[in-house]
């Protein structure tokens, strides 16, 4: 039996002035907010089809009409002025017809503080960069904070985490609308919400999150849906989904979410409410339609429906959002139809080799802005050294061409181990090096020379999926061609559909003297695997991997995977050789790492630059107590005098500067002794030094 949940509405208008700043959200935000009753409301006030309430405000430069929202007791409208002057509510409409509330007091707002920077956009002059409305640059730098787990010991809330982020210059966060920690408007785990209505405690929590983001200059990538809601396999929540027919709902299967007309209508109503209540805020970088939609049941059974849903929902958001926030989703970048209506790519990766994983997106030659919205280590499925992993994520991505930093997933580890200072160092480097002021910096191959050679270790750059090539080359300089697109899953013979994703690999090597290639693996399925290796076409080594128990069905793949810790060593003679590696076992094997003994310089370098500027991250291939030093050769800098500025990636401070000269072809300079790693930028000697950034606060509430 349906019950009435819509009481009479009262009138009250209030002005609320807010303030915020950052490279994410800028100073001088003055939000105006009015509350009022709406006569003649019938049916569901949360459904814009039944009650489309809009408010027209006269502002400097012309009128603007905005959607209003119902807060459980009254109606409200929020607006972000873009200039100083008088703002006046001139009309309120319900379903296109002007209505007259009992009173509106006051009708006008005199604005002196306003948003100067505005919202985050794609730079019309450079589709790979983000900017604000005022043209200032925005480079996403932060981490995920998707939820708070049930039963966690007391930890900082999301607003408290944002305050910590502000102190170190981190300006991006990704938050899910999920049901288990009061962040999904229409699905709470602890109580039933009538379809078509929204929980006001959840809505208020998002008000608090937005206020904290504005105060602390953090832009939110707001994830509207997550795969588990409509999945029976990947992090499945379908069994408790209230719209599941088994739970009293009406959906026969999880796949129906993407095609059922009632669901589409309810989803649009929710998105319209989100826009009306929160869309005013430039602290929202973007609407992310889905987290890892490839994990849904429908993605496996009806991809066209998933693609169509994305295109239709993106069109709806653009139609309804007066502030035109960016729109994205998160999934594999290789499914072009999924990304047709998205403003930027938001990929996820959990790879054995973080530095290599950063190169994965580089190798795809994407056609618009991109960065990793999630990244983490896949070595044994855990974070054995989160400090080093986060460090590698930040500095490898700063040296890439991606439009933002690679965003670390494990927010609990950042809190538990107090890793916030790493973001401070990265933020300071971006400011002092003026790295973001250059429109285009392309990858450069900086050659390192050291007295000794050491092991070259590398791992696959991508997780599950097709390898972009089967041919790789490990050059003696330490660069491995193609490894960014290497899948971590070398496929077996059992599944004919999966085998072509990564059927074999060929690795070209060039040892200065006879050496050894080692292949480390860490996971198989219950069906087992067999790695066979040949060198120049001659069978050389083999490794059979079987699960601890032989009690399994030999005729079908198993669902349970098995952790292993195995390594296969292959002798390789001096000179050039081609090593072929194939899995002739029944199912896939997870490749963790390749090691070439005494193969590469002791120092590794990632860099990018142009004819007047270069930047690079220099790190040791192998840890050790004794410092390592070498000489670097940087190509393609114009002839002239330069300054090489050495930057401590831990303390976030400049270590030293040294004068260097380019002959127009190569610029060479010594690194000095390095215990761990260092970042360097090279700029013309005449460049004006950048000033030290200061921590700012922009709270005016």
Image: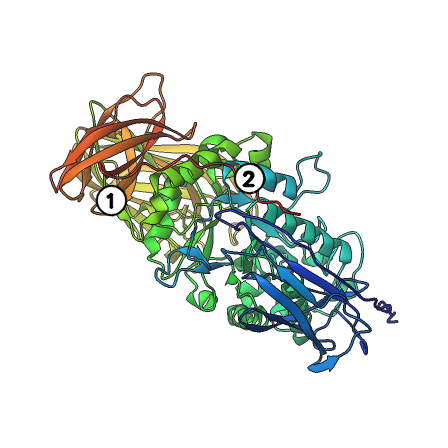
Packing grade of label 2 (10 A; few <14, some 14-19, many >=20) is many
- At a point 47% along the width and 55% down the height, the residue shown is 346
Q: Is residue 201 left or right of residue 67?
A: right
Do labels 2 and 1 touch, CB within 8 Å?
A: no
- Return the residue nearer the eye: 132 or 536: 132
Residue 444's tag is: 1
Image quadrant assignment for residue 184: bottom right
Q: Secondary structure at mark 1?
A: strand
Vertical placement of residue 284 versus 353, above or below: below
Residue furthest top in the image: 626
Q: Disc 2 or disc 1, which is closer to the eye? A: 2
Vertical placement of residue 593 versus 347, above or below: above
Q: Is residue 301 left or right of residue 334?
A: right
Rendering coords of residue 669 (x, y %): 19, 30
Rendering coords of residue 58 (x, y %): 62, 72
- Observer able to see residue 123: yes
Q: Secondary structure at mark 2?
A: helix
Vertical placement of residue 631 versus 43, above or below: above
Packing grade of label 1 (10 A; few <14, some 14-19, many >=20) is some
Rendering coords of residue 521 (x, y %): 42, 37
Residue 165's tag is: 2
- Return the residue nearer the eye: 393 or 94: 94
Rendering coords of residue 397 (x, y %): 39, 43
- At a point 51% along the width and 58% down the height, the residue shown is 118
Mark pair 2, 1: CA separation: 32 Å
Which image quarter is the N terminus in? bottom right
Q: Looking at the image, is mark 2 or mark 1 earlier in the sequence? A: 2
């Amino acid at each position: 039996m349906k019950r009435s949940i819509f009481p009479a509405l009262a009138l009250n208008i209030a002005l609320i002035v807010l303030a915020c700043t950052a490279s994410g959200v800028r100073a001088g935000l003055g939000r105006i907010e009015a509350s009022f009753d709406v006569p003649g409301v019938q049916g569901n006030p949360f459904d814009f089809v039944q009650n489309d309430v809009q408010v027209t405000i006269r502002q400097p430069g012309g009128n603007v009409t905005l959607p209003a929202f119902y807060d459980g007791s009254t109606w409200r409208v929020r607006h972000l002025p873009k200039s100083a002057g008088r703002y006046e509510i001139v009309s309120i409409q319900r379903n296109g017809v002007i209505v007259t509330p009992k009173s509106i007091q006051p009708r006008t707002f005199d604005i002196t503080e306003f948003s100067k920077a505005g919202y985050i956009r794609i730079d019309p002059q450079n589709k790979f960069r983000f900017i604000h409305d005022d043209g200032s640059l925005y480079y996403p730098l932060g981490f995920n904070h998707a939820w708070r787990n049930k039963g966690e010991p007391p930890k900082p809330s999301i607003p408290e985490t944002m305050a910590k982020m502000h102190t170190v210059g981190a300006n991006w966060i990704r938050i899910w609308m999920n049901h288990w920690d009061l962040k999904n408007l229409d699905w709470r785990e602890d109580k039933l919400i009538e379809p078509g209505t929204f929980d006001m405690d959840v809505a208020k929590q998002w008000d608090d999150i937005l206020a904290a983001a504005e105060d602390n200059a953090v832009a939110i990538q707001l994830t509207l849906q997550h795969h588990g809601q409509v999945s029976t396999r990947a992090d499945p929540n379908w069994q408790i989904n209230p719209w599941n027919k088994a739970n009293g709902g009406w959906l026969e299967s999880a796949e129906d979410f993407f095609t059922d007309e009632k669901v589409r209508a309810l989803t649009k109503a929710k998105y319209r409410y989100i826009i009306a209540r929160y869309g005013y805020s430039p602290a929202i970088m973007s609407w992310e339609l889905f987290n890892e939609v490839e994990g849904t049941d429908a993605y496996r059974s009806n991809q066209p429906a998933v693609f169509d849903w994305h295109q239709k929902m993106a069109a709806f958001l653009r139609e309804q959002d007066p502030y035109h926030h960016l729109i994205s989703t998160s999934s594999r970048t290789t499914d072009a139809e999924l990304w047709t209506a998205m403003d930027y790519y938001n990929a996820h990766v959990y790879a054995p080799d973080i530095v290599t994983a950063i190169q994965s997106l580089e190798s795809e030659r994407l056609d618009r802005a991109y960065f990793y919205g999630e990244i983490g280590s896949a070595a044994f499925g855990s974070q054995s050294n989160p400090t080093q992993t986060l460090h590698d994520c930040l500095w490898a991505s700063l040296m890439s061409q991606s439009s933002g930093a690679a965003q670390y997933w494990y927010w609990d580890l950042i809190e538990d181990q107090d890793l916030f200072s790493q973001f401070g160092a990265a933020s300071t480097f971006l400011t002092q090096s003026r790295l973001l002021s250059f429109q285009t910096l392309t990858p450069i191959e900086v050659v390192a020379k050291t007295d000794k050679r050491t092991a070259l270790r590398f791992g696959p750059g991508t997780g599950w999926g097709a390898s972009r090539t089967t041919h790789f080359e490990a050059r003696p300089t330490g660069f491995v061609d193609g490894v960014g697109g290497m899948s971590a899953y070398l496929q077996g013979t059992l599944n004919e559909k999966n085998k072509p994703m990564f059927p074999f690999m060929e690795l070209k090597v060039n040892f200065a003297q006879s050496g050894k290639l080692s292949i480390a693996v860490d996971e198989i399925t219950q069906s087992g695997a067999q790695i066979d290796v040949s060198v120049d076409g001659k069978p050389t080594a083999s490794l059979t991997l079987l699960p601890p128990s032989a009690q399994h069905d030999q005729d079908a793949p198993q669902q349970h995977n098995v952790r292993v810790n195995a390594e296969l060593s292959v002798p390789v003679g001096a000179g050039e050789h081609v090593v072929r590696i194939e899995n002739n076992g029944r199912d896939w094997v997870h490749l963790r790492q390749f090691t070439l003994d005494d193969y590469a310089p002791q120092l590794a370098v990632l860099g990018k630059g142009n004819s007047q500027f270069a930047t690079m991250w220099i790190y040791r291939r192998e840890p050790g107590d004794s410092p390592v030093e070498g000489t670097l050769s940087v190509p393609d800098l114009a002839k002239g005098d330069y300054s090489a500025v050495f930057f401590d990636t831990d303390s976030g401070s400049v270590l030293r500067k040294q004068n260097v000269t380019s002959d127009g072809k190569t610029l060479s300079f010594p690194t000095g002794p390095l215990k761990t790693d260092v970042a360097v930028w090279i700029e013309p000697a005449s460049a004006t030094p950048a000033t030290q950034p200061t921590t700012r606060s922009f709270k005016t509430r």
